[in-house]
Structures are given as structure tokens and as C-alpha cells.
Amino acid sequence: MKQDIKDLISAALSALTSNGQLALAEPPEPQVERAKDASHGDFATNIAMVLAKQARTKPRDLAQHILDALPASPLVAKAEIAGPGFINFFLAEDAYRAVVPRVLEAGRGYGRSDIGAGKRVQVEFVSANPTGPLHVGHGRGAAYGAVVADLLAAVGFDVHREYYVNDAGRQMDILAASVWLRYLELCGEELRFPSNGYKGDYVWDIAATLHREHGDAYRVEAGQVFAGLPPDAALEGEPQDDGGDKEAHIDGLIDAAKRLLGDNRYRYVFELGLSTILDDIRADLLEFGVEYQEWYSERSLTESGAVNKAIERLRESGQVYEQNGALWFRSTDFGDEKDRVVVRDNGQTTYFASDIAYHMDKLERGFDRVIDIWGADHHGYIPRVKAALKALGDNTDRLDVLLVQFAILYRGGEKAQMSTRSGEFVTLRQLRKEVGSDAARFFYVMRRCEQHLDFDLDLAKSQSSDNPVYYVQYAHARVCSVLRQAADRGMVVEPSSGTTHLDRLSEEHEQALLRTLTRYPEVVESAALKEEPHQLTHYLRELANELHTYYNAHQFLVEDTALRDARIKLILAVRQVLRNGLGLLGVSAPESM
RNA sequence: GCCCUCGUAGCUCAGCUGGAUAGAGCAAUCGCCUCCUAAGCGAUAGGUCACAGGUUCGAAUCCUGUCGAGGGCACCA
């Protein structure tokens, strides 16, 4: 509908330019807004003020020229100049009514569009290390990423959802070592678990599987494992302090594990840990309604030689140098704060090296746009990744990095602080179990992603109008309920076609609903293009509110069959939009509550 | 110290890429079921848009500085 107004203005502008009244190289896309105040009509444009300077005309005079050149349209009842040079459009009384058949005919397709024109967009999100279960912070990234991806798909982009699996690197070795040490404990060995190891219960579970299936086949005397190891540091929260370096200690343990187990057995423990946790993450996300087209393995980048290729490309263009036995990328030449290591002095490539290769690969795969959704703690990482892509001659405009701030849980008004200590944290699974997937999805995307999220667990669980999820879902259920009532009373529920009887919708509440329904496609488009799902949650709250208000003010199942037909059609359209909107958020639309 | 994000009603947040008189929801106060689910609705009250400058027809929005909150500054991932 907004587009219709834009088209009218554009037509007027080109008419003015072609008959010489307006000298413009290229008329810009007019800005059209929904008027906030009813006295300003329905839509307003500031085009005359924007172009006044260029056209060397006073804004109000230019507005008058545009007005005179405006083609007639059945949509517009009148257009007038206001204030410093706004043009206000007042729509014809029945302009909004047409939205009802439009919604009902389009059904699930209402709100979808093809402005993305099939452009390929990759959305990479969550990508948590498979060293433990997802926690509530990952949950926000999951919900946000999934909704952004779905929104982009809804407006016509070809969306590729991807999870980058960090299945290589030191953290995974630490996990393997942790599993093995727990296994040794299960075998009866006594040892001091490293302060830097993974201490969650899930590590015990994996160790138990190993023990159950392979008995003592992986057992080595603890004394042998710890022999000659650099001392550990203090265990967090415990008094014992060997005064050592926890990093050196755990690295020593990893080496010991590799040496004592040999390649094959070490590999087995490593894979067992990786696959168990990755399976858990997959299942977790699936239950949360988050699906991926691809799980991209970091290890595959090394194995395919992509990492070396990326480093070679940097070397060829003279972007790297050696210092202290390590290979550094000159990222400061491309706006980073300091140069970064790509190959460590022990010959291992860094995580950053993999990331360069990964992003190179993303762009080579031919995506028109690449969106990375990261936790806010990774923000320092953006300049170096962009620096690498620039160094390789790639266009970083195609890459968009969105940072998701942390979610802080509140219970009973108190911060439910999660602590990484000894593996105690609130997992996504626990959250889903406590508040349900619907509430979790909705709450997670209710705020702009760069805003810290206060997640009120009590509110998310409460079955009251304070809870925005229930509020919106209830509006949907309420429409269903009315239709059931109608059927029970033997009324015709099947609505008439087209705009039949819709002229009976003359109440203010009805006008408001019609107007809000026409806004839906604009909201979806804006939410998608700006990657702001919260626009949709706000919209849905508003639509639900208008439905509830309407419900309280007027009876739908009236004796007057024409009026009843019109009202049923209207609430059917409302239900459809609620359903579509909730669907994009990954939230269910219950028929009764 | 340097960098990033944020600062709007008592609380949680919107404010549509610079527009017209700054909006919701909680919480507070007062009302509304003989009526399709009161898991709902209405009304009242609540503001120096952190502060100070600047840019222009016009600033909560853009720029600079100050203050405050959170995060980041590894041969970790």
C-alpha cells in the first residue's frame, strides 16, 4: 500500500521532469511514511522538502507542483500540503477494506514478497564450539539467527543457514583430554582433574560411554599420565594452588594423552566427545525449531588444504611476515589494531587462519551476501576478519557481522547468574524446559540484538496478559474460539467472497484493524532488510491488542447476517496475519488456550 | 590506556536511516463480565530523550567532547 503511494509520487515527479518544470537528473525514491496523526491523513511524504534545494523552489511551491501532477487514483481521496512542505495523503474510505480478501486469498503467502529477487544470502549463526551443551547465550543467537533467516526467506532471498563447527583446534583437544581423564577415574585411577579441563557432568557421561563399551582398553596408570608435567594452577574456588600455569599443564596432558594412547585410540576418544556433543547440539536446536542447510566443518578446511591456500595467498601478496618463529598477518595495514598470528611457532595454524579460509570460501561460494551472527564477546574479531578479506582483495561489503548481546536471566526479580565455574550454567535445554520453546523464541527476539536482554523467567512462564507471548497467542485462540461458537450455534462460518459486505465495517475499531493489516507486509519487509525481528514482535502485540479491544467493544456473532459475515471475514484475516507472523518467529499459533 | 555497544516515564523497551504535539507494556490509581474465553478491555497519572556544544528549515535520531553501564583488547577458541 505504501508502495502504491510511492508509485504515484514517482509518476508525478517524472511528469514534472519530462515537461521541464523540474530539473532533475534522476528523481530519487520518494520517502513515504505512515502518518502518526490522523489529522495528517494516512500517508505523508517529505519529498518536496528534500528536493527543494536542488529544484531551487520553495518547498511548499514544489509540493503544489507535485500535487498538480499527481495522477488520479481510486486509492486516494485527497492529498494536501501541510506544514513546511509535507504532502499528506488521505485514502478513500474503502481503500483499506480490500486488504481482507487480499489476506484471505494469499493465506500463508500474505506478507511474503520477492524483493530479495532470489539473491543468495548465507546466514551463519550459533556456531558454538562442540565442547559442551548450548547455554542461554547461544539460545539468543539461535532464535535471532533463525528468525532473521526466515524473514529474509519470506521476502524472497535464497537463504542458506549454516553452522560452523569448530571440530579442530586446542579446545577440542582439551575436551578429549577431559573425557579421557574422567574415564581413567571411572577405571579407578586417582588423579587431580586439571583446572582448565571441562568439568561439566556431560563429560562424565561421555567417559561412562567409553568405559561401558571398551572397559579398560584405554586405561593408563595415572602416575604415567602426570609424570613430568608442568604444574597446574589453582583450581577455581579451591585453595589448592600448585603455582603453575594451567595452560602449560593442560597442553602437557594433551600431549601425554596423544603419546600414551597412540593415534588411533586418541582419535577415537576425540571423535566420541565431538560426535556426542554435536549430536546433542543438533537435537537441541532442532527441538528449538532451528534448522540448518549445512554444518560446515572447520577440520575440512584444513584437510582440503583451504587453510594453507589462504595463508599462501596472503604470503604471495606480501601480507605476512615471520617473527619469533611465528607467521604474522599484517592486519594493521587494513585497519586492525595489531597484527595477528596465523601460524604458531609450534607449526599449528590458528583459529584465525581457519576463519580466513572459511570466509574466503563463503565468498567463493558465490553468496551475494554473507551474514555472520556472533556473540558480543567476539566483536574485537570483526576488524581482523575484514582485514583478511580486504588483503585477499575481496569486497567486504558483502559481509555483514551482527553482534548479539548477552541475555541475563531473572528469576523472582533476582539475577539468575550463570557461572562457568565447574560447568554450572543454565543450558538452552533447561530454559526450553522451564519456559517452553514458544516463550523462549519470542522473548529472545523481542529486543534489538545490540540491546542487552533482560530475560524475565517468571514473566515468560506466566499465563497472563503481561506475558506478550500469551497475549498474542490468545488473540489467535480467541478468533478460533469465536468461530467454534458460531459453528455451535449453526451460523454460517464460511465467509462470502471478495469485498462483499465489507462496507459494513465502519466502526473505529474495525478501521484500525484494517489499517494495521495493511501494514503487515511493510513490517515484514523492514524487519527482514534491517535484520530486526523485534519489529515483528511489536507489530504482533499491536495487532493482538486491537483484536482484543475490538472483541470487548463489539459482538461479532450478531443477528444481522451481512454484518456478521463482514466481521467474521475481518477476524479471519486478523487470524491469518497472527498466524503468519508467529510462524515467522517460530512460535506456535494455538487454536485454544 | 585504546576500541566496540548502549544511556528515552519508577521498571523493561519502541521511536520506521533527520520530520509535524516523544510512544507502548509493566508497576500505581480508578472503572468494565446477565454478553462470542476477564489468559481480555477502558481511563488517569507519569519525560530537561545522561550532560554540553555543533551541523540545518528541523535533532531522541548525524558529528565532537564529558559522565555513566556492559563488553573487548592472547602464539585461546
Image (cartoon, rainbow, N blue to C red):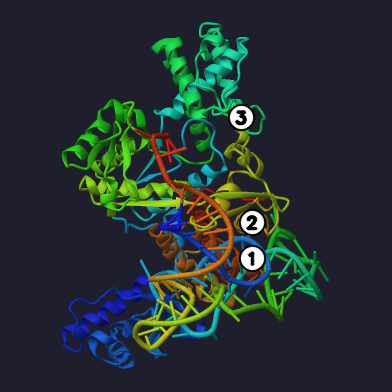
Residue A137 spot, x, y in % from top left: 54, 44
Identify the subunit bearing mark 3: A
Horizontally, residue A349 falls left or right of residue A318, namely: right
To which residue does mark 1 refer? A548
Give the number of the disc on residue A474: 2
Q: CA distance from mark 2 to mark 1?
A: 9 Å
Q: Secondary structure at mark 1?
A: helix
Q: CA distance from mark 2 to mark 3?
A: 50 Å
Give the number of the disc on residue A492: none
Q: CA distance from mark 3 to mark 1?
A: 56 Å
Amino acid at pointer 3: Leu
Q: Secondary structure at mark 3?
A: loop
Amino acid at pointer 1: His
Q: Residues within 10 Å of mark 3 (few under 14, many from 20)?
A: some
Q: Residues within 10 Å of mark 2 (few under 14, many from 20)?
A: many
Q: Answer yes or no: do the residues labelled 2 and 1 have beta carbons within 8 Å?
A: yes
Residue A536 spot, x, y in % from top left: 50, 59
Q: Residue at x 45, y 68 (%)?
A: A518
Amino acid at pointer 2: Tyr
